[in-house]
Structures are given as C-alpha cells and as structure tokens.
C-alpha cells in the first residue's frame, strides 16, 4: 500500500472518530459543560485540519501530470576538435 493511500485512510479515520466523539458528547448531554464544549471545539478543529489536508490531497491527485522533458537536440554539424596537448617544461 502506498503512503498516500495510508495517509488518506488515516485521515478519514481521524475525521470519523472526531465527528463521532462530537455526536456522543451531544447525545450524552456532556456538551453543556465547559469541558464538553472545549472537547467539541478541539475535535472539530482536528477534523477541519484533516479535512483540509484531504481536500489538498485530492486536488493534487486530480492535477494532470507534468509533460515529460524534451530531449536536448544535438547539432549534427558540430564536430569535436582535438585537444592540443602541451608539455610543461
């Protein structure tokens, strides 16, 4: 499995857990306390951060691949000249 697929699955899992925690806090009535409100805000912030990462990852995957580089054209008329050798005295 590629690293992008693993990160995608992990992000979806984190978002699901955060939203599930928010739902459980709301259903249990614990969201009426200060601690519950803070926990809901933290879960929503984490879900938002991972959601933005997923949006970035999906948009990047949908971009067309860059064109392959063109090979450099070598001029056929150019000939290599011999290198003059000199002796040091």
Image (tube, helix red, strand yellow):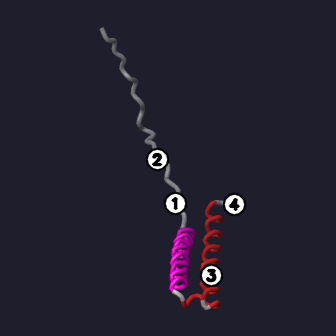
Query: Which residue: 54% across, 80% down?
Result: 39
| Residue found 55% across the figure and 91% down from its top | 32
Horizontal relation, residue 20 to residue 60: left or right:
right
Residue linked to disc 2: 72
User: Which residue is identified by label 3?
Assistant: 21
Q: Look at discs 2 and 1 and give the one toward the viewer.
A: 1
Callouts 2 and 1 close, C-beta under 8 Å: no
Tag 2 secondary structure:
loop
- The numbered mark, 3 or 4, whose residue comes first in the sequence reads 4
Mark 4 sits on what residue? 1
Disc nearer the start of the sequence (2/4) = 4
Q: Which mark is residue 67?
A: 1
Distance Cα–Cα, label 3 vs label 4:
29 Å
Residue 5's place in the image compared with 88, above or below, is: below
How crowded pointer 1 is (Cα within 10 Å; few <14, some 14-19, many 20+) is rated as few
Viewer-proximal residue among 81 and 68: 68
Tell which of 44 and 40 is nearer to you.
40
Sequence-wise first label, 3 or 1:
3
Residue at 62% across, 87% down = 23
Q: Report whether 64 appears left or right of 80.
A: right
Query: Which residue is rendered at x = 54% and y = 67% of the image?
Result: 64
Residue range highlighted in magenta:
34-63
**Residues under numbered marks 3 and 1 in contact, where contact means CB atoms less than 8 Å apart:** no
The answer to which of marks 2 and 1 sits earlier in the sequence is 1
How far apart are labels 2 and 1 at the CA level? 15 Å
Q: Earlier in the sequence, mark 2 or mark 3?
A: 3
Give how far apart the Cα atoms at labels 2 and 3 are: 58 Å
């Amino acid at each position: 499995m590629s690293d992008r697929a693993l990160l995608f699955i992990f992000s979806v899992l984190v978002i699901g857990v955060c939203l599930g925690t928010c739902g459980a806090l709301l259903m249990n009535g614990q969201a009426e306390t200060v601690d519950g409100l803070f926990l809901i805000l933290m879960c929503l912030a984490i879900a938002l951060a991972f959601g933005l990462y997923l949006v970035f990852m999906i948009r990047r995957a949908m971009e067309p691949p860059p064109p392959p580089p063109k090979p450099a054209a070598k001029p056929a008329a150019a000939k290599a000249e011999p290198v003059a050798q000199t002796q040091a005295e």
